[in-house]
Image (cartoon, rainbow, N blue to C red):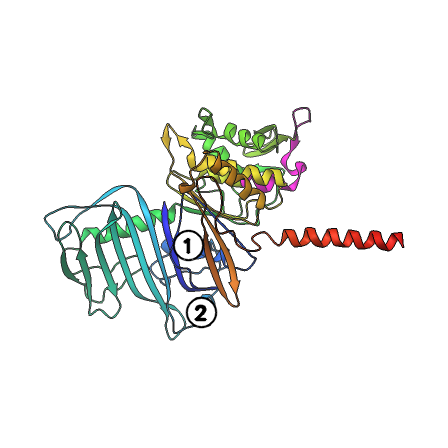
């Protein structure tokens, strides 16, 4: 699970400061206030980690990529080519890691890692790595750090903090350079095994980062499935039905709500469609005339006839990938949802909060999934339900992080919303959801004036 995220000199962000992330984190705020770019850079890191060594250290993509952010120079805050793009990613490991081949008689065990990277534009305006720094922690206490700097005279600096302080350097192999933004270069002689272990942990957390865009694929009358198992529902949710079929084929069973037994995957999706008042029945059936084609059938209420997903209304097709992604992602994954409430009625928007709470609390095979969900939202109904569930003790306020993003000229700003155990927000931002009281007062005044004019 990602525990904190910081960005400097990226798009609207001069410096986000350290953003603490919880199992359920929600970003509210104005349009064009930088909410989406917080997740966009993580997606760029994910596709960079999957790129070949011939690619630049940061791969911002193209029209065929997971995400297309344009050129590196276009993404620098205010076009400041002389300032580096910097980021710091800190995450909790799924299990304690014992690091091998470290110059100390004591083994080093860590349960959390932090990666800090600085990248600057070269003369061709391409990303060039300036520095990579890893830090390892156990129970919140720093155990070690290892630093690469492009001007560090061909060596890595290693600093052991616990149990006894020790500092030493590792000489780099001839002409060694980092292949990726997270890969420390090879050292001379016998390579330090812990360096590749750190890179593998970064690849793992990024592989388990999944994001669903705000604009999701429209409903189809039929869906093709040939037995594949998608990694996610896809950036636009285009593989949502494929994911349900794959999960069913694997006989995955999840606890879709705390008070419910574990259910087959399709049954769990049907459960939440019913709980949110969207559909009373949900099924995926093969078409008789073809081998690999399926249709999605739903009932809008108990007495209604079954209809194809394509005939039920656009909102259901937009909600379905959100529910599927929330439970389909693997244990310990981080799921970023962009405006999951789009095209949904206010009652369903409130129900989203219940569904996402259940997703972060879900179990699979009797084991906690420890999944993290991060949401970008404009929904007051979503927030109201979330506050209510905190007050009711359904979810702890410590497992929720809320932020409000705004703009001050060209610069984005972010404010942490302090929510207590009763669901109350102590520092409610001005105009979080618009100026409702001004609208109410103006409407009442206009009504009075029109009535006076009609009576004269």
CA gap, disc 1 to disc 2?
17 Å
**Can residue 101 be seen from the camera position used here?**
yes
Question: At numbered mark 2, what does the secondary structure look like: helix, strand or loop?
Answer: helix
Magenta-colored stretch includes residue 306 = yes
Q: Which residue is mark 1?
A: 42
Horizontal side, residue 196 vs residue 334: left or right: left
Classify mark 2: residues with Cα within 10 Å, few (<14), some (14-19) or many (20+). Answer: many
What residue span does the magenta drawing correspond to?
301-321
Q: Position of residue 305 (x, y in %)?
A: 68, 26
Point out the residue furthest to the right here.
Answer: 456
Q: Position of residue 120 (x, y in %)?
A: 36, 69
In this view, 317 is above or below 268: below
Point out the residue furthest to the left here.
Answer: 105
**Can residue 180 be seen from the camera position used here?**
no
Horizontal side, residue 371 vs residue 438: left or right: left
Instruction: Count the marks.
Output: 2
Q: Position of residue 143 (x, y in %)?
A: 21, 51
- Judging depth in this view, the residue of 291 and 204 nearest the camera is 204
Q: Which residue is mark 2?
A: 73
Horizontal side, residue 301 vs residue 61: left or right: right
Magenta-colored stretch includes residue 420 = no
């Amino acid at each position: 699970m990602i525990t904190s995220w910081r960005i400097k000199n990226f798009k609207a962000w001069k410096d986000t400061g350290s953003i603490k992330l919880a199992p359920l984190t929600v970003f509210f705020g104005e349009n064009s206030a930088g909410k989406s770019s917080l997740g966009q850079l993580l997606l760029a890191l994910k596709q960079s980690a999957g790129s070949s060594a011939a690619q630049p250290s940061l791969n911002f993509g193209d029209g065929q990529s997971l995400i297309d952010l344009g050129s590196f120079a276009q993404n620098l805050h205010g076009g400041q080519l002389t300032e580096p793009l910097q980021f710091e990613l800190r995450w909790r490991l799924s299990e304690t890691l014992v690091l091998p081949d470290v110059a100390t008689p004591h083994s080093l065990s860590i349960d959390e890692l932090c990666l800090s990277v600085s990248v600057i534009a070269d003369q061709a305006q391409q990303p060039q790595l300036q520095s990579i720094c890893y830090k390892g922690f156990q129970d919140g206490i720093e155990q070690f750090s290892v630093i690469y700097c492009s001007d560090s005279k061909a060596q890595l600096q290693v600093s052991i903090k616990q149990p006894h302080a020790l500092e030493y350097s590792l000489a780099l192999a001839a002409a060694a350079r980092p292949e990726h933004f997270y890969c420390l270069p090879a050292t001379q002689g016998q390579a330090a095994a812990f360096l590749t272990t750190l890179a593998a942990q970064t690849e793992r957390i990024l592989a388990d980062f999944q994001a669903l865009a705000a604009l999701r694929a429209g409903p189809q009358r039929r869906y093709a499935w040939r037995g594949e198992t998608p990694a996610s529902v896809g950036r636009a949710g285009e593989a949502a039905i494929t994911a349900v079929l794959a999960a069913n084929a694997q006989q995955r069973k999840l606890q879709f709500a705390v008070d419910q037994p574990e259910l087959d995957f399709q049954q769990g999706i049907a459960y939440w469609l019913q709980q949110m008042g969207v559909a009373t029945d949900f099924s995926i059936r093969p078409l008789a005339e073809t081998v690999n084609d399926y249709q999605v059938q739903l009932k809008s209420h108990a007495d209604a006839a079954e209809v194809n997903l394509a005939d039920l209304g656009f909102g259901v097709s937009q909600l379905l990938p959100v529910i599927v992604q929330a439970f389909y992602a693997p244990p310990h994954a981080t799921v970023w949802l962009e405006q999951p409430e789009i095209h949904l009625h206010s009652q369903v928007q409130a129900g989203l909060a219940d569904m996402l709470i259940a997703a972060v609390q879900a179990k699979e095979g009797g084991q906690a999934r420890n999944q993290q969900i991060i949401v970008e939202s404009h929904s007051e109904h979503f927030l109201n339900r979330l506050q209510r569930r905190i007050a009711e003790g359904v979810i702890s306020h410590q497992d929720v992080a809320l932020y409000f993003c705004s703009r001050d000229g060209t610069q984005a700003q972010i404010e942490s919303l302090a929510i207590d155990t009763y669901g109350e927000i102590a520092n409610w931002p001005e105009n979080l959801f618009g100026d409702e009281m001004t609208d109410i007062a103006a409407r009442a005044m206009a009504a009075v004036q029109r009535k006076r004019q009609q009576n004269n």
